[in-house]
Amino acid sequence: MTEPRPPEPAALCMAGLLALAMAMGIGRFAFTPLMPLMLRDGLIDTAAGAELAAANYVGYLLGALTAARLARAPLRLLRGGLVGVVLLTAASAWTVHGPLAWGVRGLAGVCSAWVLVAASTWCLRELAAAGHGRLGAWIYVGVGTGITGAGLLAWLGGRQPSQALWLELAALAALGSMAVGLLLRGQHDRGTSTAALPAPDNGRGQGRVVLCYGSFGFGYIVPATFLPAMARMQVDDPLVFGLAWPLFGLAAAVSVAAAARWLSAWPRRRVWAWAQALMAVGSALPLLGRSPALLALSAVLVGGTFMVATMAGLQWARELLPANPTGLLARMTSAFAAGQIAGPLVVRAAGPWLPPGLDAVGLGSALAALLLAATAAWLAWGAATVPRPRAVSVPPAPGG
């Protein structure tokens, strides 16, 4: 069988960017800007909206847990996950009640996690094998780009029925997935050829890396979930709420692009530490007050760092286990998903038990800030002590 020509680095970056934009911006996060419109249309109530969001979180966790086995063929998993995102987004237009709706949102979360792990595994591996490993940061611009695109579509088309917007998002996901297919035309899963890759870390500190990434999931989701509610109590302007989500995505996209452009020479661990530290500050700001200015600054700090932390964390996992990072990537994504599920649950469970004068959101923000600060300190403390990876040759694995 003739070995296909390696894809161009630009095509690899664009394929990964578009894949994450479709899977995460639409499959994972599109429910956030559409939920208020579904409430407006009477399709769901607040309780049902919370259940559908939780189903997506659980599905994301299940997808991460199963990705390690399935991602032995990452390119196949990436393509299959994108097909699932398209079909499930379309199905979301009609399945809004009961177990079937939970299943659709849950499976959308599964497919999103599959694409994230598969794209991180395959694109980063191929870029490293071609000697362009630093370009891998650009694929994570796709998450913020997808969030921005889905948010703008919901904002500009907000007068339409929410069901029509779901179908439009499905069409957008289909176009993006077709573009990914064209960029990767002729490629198939295969082992990495001999190339200069970082030497493995022999598993040192992997548990702590997973713990840091799980703390990041908890720390990010608390402000991401409750900042809109806090802002709604301060400014009663629907246009502001409609723009909040695309601006959040724009901050994520711009921050990742800036990190890819100006921080490419920094050790990934150090980039992750700084991103997590800034996120800790953003999580703590609502403790100082609930003014619109403080809430806006909190949103910028959290929105502008959560994808930088994602990018740097997954890239560092690739450096720790260059030959086969899929298992570590899946464990990190699982920990992130578990932390993401735990955040709102902790806030909800703590509410009835707090003494007067304390609120559950404040407690959650404080806990998120403490976890983020502690893990950022560990990442920063060890950044100077980790030796720079040396180049080794990785023999080719059997073709797939």
Image (cartoon, grey):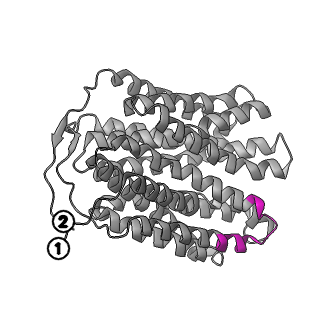
- Count of picture labels: 2
**Residue 62 visible, this orientation:** no
| Residue 359, position as x, y percentages in the image | 70, 36
Dots 1, 2 in contact, CB < 8 A: yes
From the image, state whether disc 1 or disc 2 is nearer to you.
1
For the residue pair 2 and 49, the one nearer the viewer reads as: 2
Mark 1 crowd level (few <14, some 14–19, many ≥20, 10 Å Cα):
few
Q: Residue at x 25, y 44 (%)?
A: 321
Q: Residue at x 19, y 54 (%)?
A: 193
Where residue 26 is drawn, which disc sits there?
A: none
**Residue 381 visible, this orientation:** yes
Q: Is residue 165 magenta?
A: yes
> Which residue has dot 2 on it?
399
Quadrant location of the C terminus? bottom left
Element type at mark 2: loop
Question: CA gap, disc 1 to disc 2?
Answer: 10 Å
- Residue 258 shown left or right of residue 119 in the figure: right
**Type of amino acid at the residue the image marks with label 2:** Gly
| Residue 165, position as x, y percentages in the image | 70, 70
- Residue 166 shown left or right of residue 109 in the figure: right
For the residue pair 355 and 207, the one nearer the viewer reads as: 207
Q: Residue at x 45, y 50 (%)?
A: 139
Q: Indicate which disc, 1 or 2, sits on the residue closer to the N terminus.
A: 1
- Dominant secondary-structure state across the stretch colored magenta: helix
Tell me the magenta residue range: 155-168
Quadrant location of the N terminus? bottom left
Rendered position, 230 above or below 283: below
Rendered position, 382 above or below 212: above
| Residue 65, position as x, y percentages in the image | 36, 58
> Which residue has dot 1 on it?
1
**Type of amino acid at the residue the image marks with label 1:** Met
